[in-house]
Image (cartoon, rainbow, N blue to C red):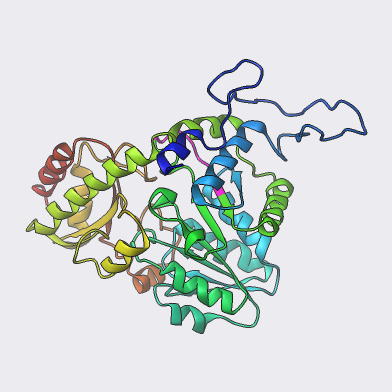
Amino acid sequence: MGFTTKQIHAGVEPDPVTGAILTPVYQTTTYVQDSVDEYLAKGYSYSRSANPTVAVLERKLAELEGGHACTCYSTGMAAIQAVVQATLSAGDHAVVSDVAYGGTYRLCTKIYARFGVEFTFADTSDANAVAAAIREDTRLILTETPANPTLKLTDVAAVSEVAREHEIIHAVDNTFLTPYYQRPLELGADIAIHSTTKYFDGHNATVGGAVVTRTAELDEAIRFVQNASGVIMSPWVAWLTLQGIKTLSLRMDRQSANAFAIAEFLEKHPKIERVCYPGLASFSQHTLASTQASGYGAMLWFEVKGGVEAGKRLMDAVELCALAENLGSVETLITHPVTMTHADVEAAERQRVGITDGLVRLSVGLEDVDDLIADLSAALETV
């Protein structure tokens, strides 16, 4: 089946009792067993461990990523946490993309570092730099590509080869491109991670996360953490996400086309210092962006001439673009990472990896692109 067919039908069957075409919301805590000897005969005992609505979403996401299995979580950060907990113990070491979501950086440096896990934030756009960062106690390579917010890319196949050579698990945060545009497991990675909050939901309605694994062994280890830590996705969130996924490819194609048009507009605007979008020929990793993925995505960033204050004036002046955190929704969102998504990253570290104070991140939505360009154009007149 093609991807668009899978995003509608994979993992879903009509309700066996009523024939309902939509998966029911199994809003229940517990499940009555037929007998002690047949405990778990129907597969469910308690909704912290497994829930039928969540299970349908997990099957769908596993098929879309081409993985063995999937587990779903209450948030995207809970998904990252499950991978860390399933692969690392006190005294272990992990290599992480030097540019990553601020929450990932905070989890590693402020939480797990306290429990004896060490992290090296390496330039994962360079497979040799990843190899150089590996130690005898390295157990995990965690990459984010495209990276939030700079859009720096990791060559997934090259880093996966390094990981295999050292018998290390390679996990890829695939939130920005989704399996519609990029499938890390097919490129050699062991785990694909998602914040389902973003493009899978697509409507700013839920928060959730997912982990898709290549093997049964990895799924077993991560599923144990999902149950033990109690971070499974709720059935209602799973149901809403199932509805959002049905239009994923349509939304992403339109949002990406809008992003390309906006990037071209900004690149030519006299008040823009620079613009970064993987679809532009000026993007430093444009060739990798064109070969590793089938689309460029709907995220871009730019800097306004006049520095930080000019950028702030623009963000305060837009009307159609909403000043808000999150990304991947049908609404266009404009964000200042330094004060919003990456505020917990130390200033020196932000500067080191290219998250400048004037960086403006744009998550492009489904609006008419002419209206979005007009909104940005009018806001630029104020700076």
- Would you say residue 113 sits in the magenta stretch? no
Give the x, y percent position of residue 217.
Answer: 70, 59
**Is 141 situated above or below 370?**
below
- Tell which residue pokes out farthest to the top in this image: 18
Give the x, y percent position of residue 187.
Answer: 47, 64
Relative placement, left or right, of 174 versus 31 is: left
Quarter of the rendering containing residue 272: bottom left
Residue 234 in view, yes or no:
no
**Observer-nearest of 326 and 239:** 239
Relative placement, left or right, of 225 versus 317 is: right
- Would you say residue 208 sits in the magenta stretch? yes
Give the x, y percent position of residue 50.
Answer: 70, 38
**Observer-nearest of 161 and 361:** 161
- Tell which residue pokes out farthest to the right in this image: 37
Quarter of the rendering containing residue 163: bottom right
Magenta span dominant secondary structure: loop
Q: Residue at x 32, y 69 (%)?
A: 354
Give the x, y percent position of residue 310.
Answer: 17, 56
Q: Which residues are magenta?
A: 203-210
**Is 197 situated above or below 354?**
above
**Is 45 situated above or below 171?**
above
